[in-house]
């Protein structure tokens, strides 16, 4: 059965069905998924029945999968480094009480694109729900192509060659972590154009996120005000929708034409077990090695206030 896509907004997001994602896909079926992604930006597959292994195998159809930071001598909750743990659980599967981990996760509630803080961007994120809270915990998505197209011609011209400076720690600061600007400046900063052509569709898109700290060549306060304005523009109701999760649901989003954020839920009492694979932009399907490990490098030193237990390469 071919893939069927039912639009959520007129130009953004689709509920998809017709493919069995637990089985290896033919090249034609993979193309149906990438075509749907190019058109809709977000594809929601309900009740997939996927296991961890099937989640990873399916994701490899779209390129090289980033790996979570190496944790020498530390136990991991999930079975392989290709699965990012987006839950509120500790290594034993219990709700975490670790303050730094809780502080770190607060950043996910801000509008962002995954890995904008790395030099190599993420194309698709594939998030699979394993356990969801009884209330809240939805994920919101915003259409950065349509939002770009609706900007004034003056603004489009102004943004054309502008470069955003992105930091993971900036988004954590924006979510309330106490990290001085001077400390952020000493850590890794990733530069990406604020506007780019989305390859799969040929449409231009904004590339901004809670990680976007400054705009190159602009006075800091003016740049930050413009970033806030652009995020507010993209996240108006006509560009956004939310997905309410059930166990087994898989959502694929293309970070290069969307932003997303997690919705609130009772973090201290309800388990939310979500696992994510993360595809590196421009890599080949089923690529297993790239010779670098940017996440381990990034987390080898993190500001103390968001230093998730066990996330440091040296195990401190
Ligand atoms: Fe995210």
Image (cartoon, helix red, strand yellow):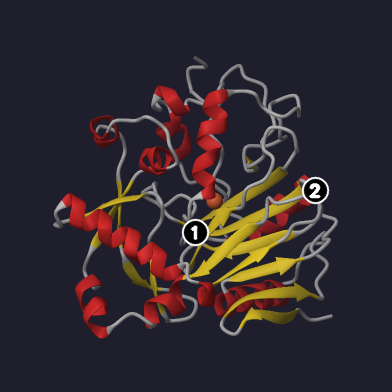
Q: Is residue 19 depicted above or below 165 in this figure?
A: below
Q: Residue visible at 27% across and 62% down?
A: 226
> Is residue 2 visible in the rendered structure shown here?
yes
Q: Is mark 2 within 8 Å of ligand 1?
A: no
Where is residue 6? Give x, y as percent.
72, 81
Q: Residue visible at 18% across and 50% down?
A: 220
Left or right of 11 on screen, residue 180: left
Left or right of 135 on screen, residue 149: left
Left or right of 264 on screen, residue 303: left
What is the C-alpha distance between the residues marked 2 and 1?
38 Å
Kindly identify which numbered label has been placed on residue 127.
Answer: none
Q: Front-most of 276 and 291?
A: 276
Q: Residue visible at 67% across and 27% down?
A: 96
Q: Residue visible at 49% across and 76% down?
A: 200
User: SS of the residue at dot 2?
Assistant: loop
Q: Residues within 10 Å of mark 2 (few under 14, many from 20)?
A: few
Which is in the foreground here, disc 2 or disc 1? 2
Kindly identify which numbered label has been placed on residue 134.
Answer: 2
> Is residue 292 visible in the rendered structure shown here?
no
Q: Earlier in the sequence, mark 2 or mark 1?
A: 2
> Quadrant location of residue 78?
top right
Q: Residues within 10 Å of mark 1 (few under 14, many from 20)?
A: some
Where is residue 299? Give x, y as percent.
44, 31
Q: Is mark 1 within 8 Å of ligand 1?
A: no
User: SS of the residue at dot 1?
Assistant: loop
């Amino acid at each position: 059965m071919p893939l069927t896509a039912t639009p959520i907004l007129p130009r953004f997001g689709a509920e998809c069905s017709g493919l069995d994602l637990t089985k290896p896909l033919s090249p034609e079926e993979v193309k149906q998924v990438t075509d749907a992604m190019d058109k809709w930006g977000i594809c929601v597959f309900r009740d997939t029945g996927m296991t961890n292994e099937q989640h990873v195998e399916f994701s490899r159809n779209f390129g090289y999968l980033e790996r979570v930071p190496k944790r020498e001598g530390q136990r991991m909750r999930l079975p392989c480094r290709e699965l990012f743990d987006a839950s509120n659980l500790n290594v034993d599967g219990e709700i975490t009480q670790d303050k730094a981990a809780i502080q770190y996760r607060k950043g996910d509630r801000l509008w962002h694109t995954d890995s904008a803080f790395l030099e190599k961007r993420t194309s698709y994120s594939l998030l699979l729900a394993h356990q969801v809270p009884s209330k809240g915990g939805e994920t919101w998505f915003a259409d950065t192509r349509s939002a770009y197209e609706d900007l004034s011609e003056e603004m489009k011209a102004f943004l054309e060659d502008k470069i955003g400076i992105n930091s993971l720690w900036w988004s954590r600061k924006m979510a309330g972590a106490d990290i001085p600007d001077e400390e952020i400046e000493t850590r890794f900063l990733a530069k990406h154009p604020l506007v780019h052509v989305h390859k799969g569709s040929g449409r231009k898109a904004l590339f901004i996120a809670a990680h976007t700290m400054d705009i190159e060549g602009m006075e800091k306060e003016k740049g930050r005000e413009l970033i806030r304005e652009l995020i507010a523009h993209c996240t108006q109701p006509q560009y956004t929708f939310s997905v309410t999760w059930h166990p087994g649901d898989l959502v694929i989003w293309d970070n290069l034409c969307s932003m997303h954020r997690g919705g609130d839920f009772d973090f201290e009492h309800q388990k939310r077990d979500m696992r994510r694979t993360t595809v590196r932009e421009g890599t080949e399907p089923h690529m297993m090695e790239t010779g670098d490990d940017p996440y381990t490098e990034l987390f080898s030193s993190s500001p103390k206030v968001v230093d998730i237990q066990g996330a440091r390469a040296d195990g401190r």
